[in-house]
Image (spheres, grey):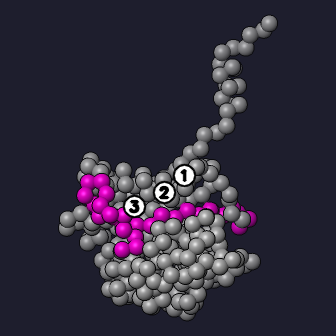
Amino acid sequence: MKRLPALCVIAAFCLAQPARAETRTLCLTVLDASSGETLVDIGPACDERVTPASTFKLAISLMGFDAGVLKNPEEPRLPFEEGYVDWRPEWRQATTPTTWMRDSVVWYSQRVMERLGRERVQRTLAAFDYGNQDIAGMAGEGDGLTTAWLGNSLQISPREQAVFMRRIAQRALPVSEHAYEATATLASYGVRGDGWQVHGKTGAGLPRGADGKPLRGRPYGWFVGWATKGERTVAFAKLIQDSERQSVAPGFRARDALFEELFVRGGLLG
């Protein structure tokens, strides 16, 4: 029996194995909230605009509380109705602002956006200087007012996200103190790592191919927010992308990686 050379056997074995899933850090950017100085800037795509996905809930929260559509962390409590987006089991129940942010409930975002109205939202996104500010939506994919941030027409870069987070931390946006306070409450992760009080939001969404169709299995993962330790406050944005779908949502993995990168003793923030 003829023996194959060892290198051929190894090569054949490697070719027979499925490609391992890879996760790329497209950007990790961190700003000093006081000075605006860039403290960390890693990755090839910090200026590339992509879907904000569920990170847009921070903007919706600010708009909603400022307009009185959202009252406090427990009101309004809206009932689930058949026909609402229900991708996850926990979305199929009555939802409050607290559970909306915690469980990232898409249909609750949509109801808040409808109550805010297109004119107010468009005006406020311009005042926020939020990404491309495009809530027109894409042809054949529903009303942009309720879909624009879901892999649709609204896009924002990691650097723009960090600047927006800095403006939240500095309270430099045209919204009420109540809107800031309530949003901070909803977005709180408590004290993490080496004494940092962290606020933020995860997000996950799909890129689009040259034909405009979603690229299934290659999701983006976001984690954006701000954090304070003593007199120091930073604003941050992290964007990752998977080569294939993984068991843990990419937004959660972006968040957990950022906690380890920034908020532990000896991390990137010193």
Q: Residue furthest top?
A: 1
Q: Which residue is mark 1?
A: 248
Query: From this viewpoint, is residue 148 visible?
Result: no
Residue 194 locus on image (x, y percent): 26, 54
| Residue named by callout 3 | 29
Residue at (65, 19) in percent of width and height: 7
Q: Is residue 159 left or right of residue 15?
A: left
Image marks 2 and 1: residues in contact by CB distance under 8 Å = yes
- The percent coordinates of residue 264 (x first, y second) are 29, 51
Drawn side of residue 20 relative to residue 41, left or right: right
- 3D distance between C-alphas at marks 3 and 1: 23 Å
Q: Disc 1 on helix, strand or loop?
A: loop
Q: Is residue 196 left or right of residue 149?
A: left
Q: Which residues are magenta?
A: 185-212
Nearest the viewer among 193 and 232 is 193
User: How much space separates mark 2 and mark 1, taking CA atoms?
Assistant: 7 Å
Which residue appears farthest toward the left when viewing the image?
Answer: 231
* Residue type, mark 2 in image: Phe
- Residue receiving disc 2: 252
85 sits left or right of 59 in the view: right
Where, quadrant-wise, is the N terminus in this rendering? top right
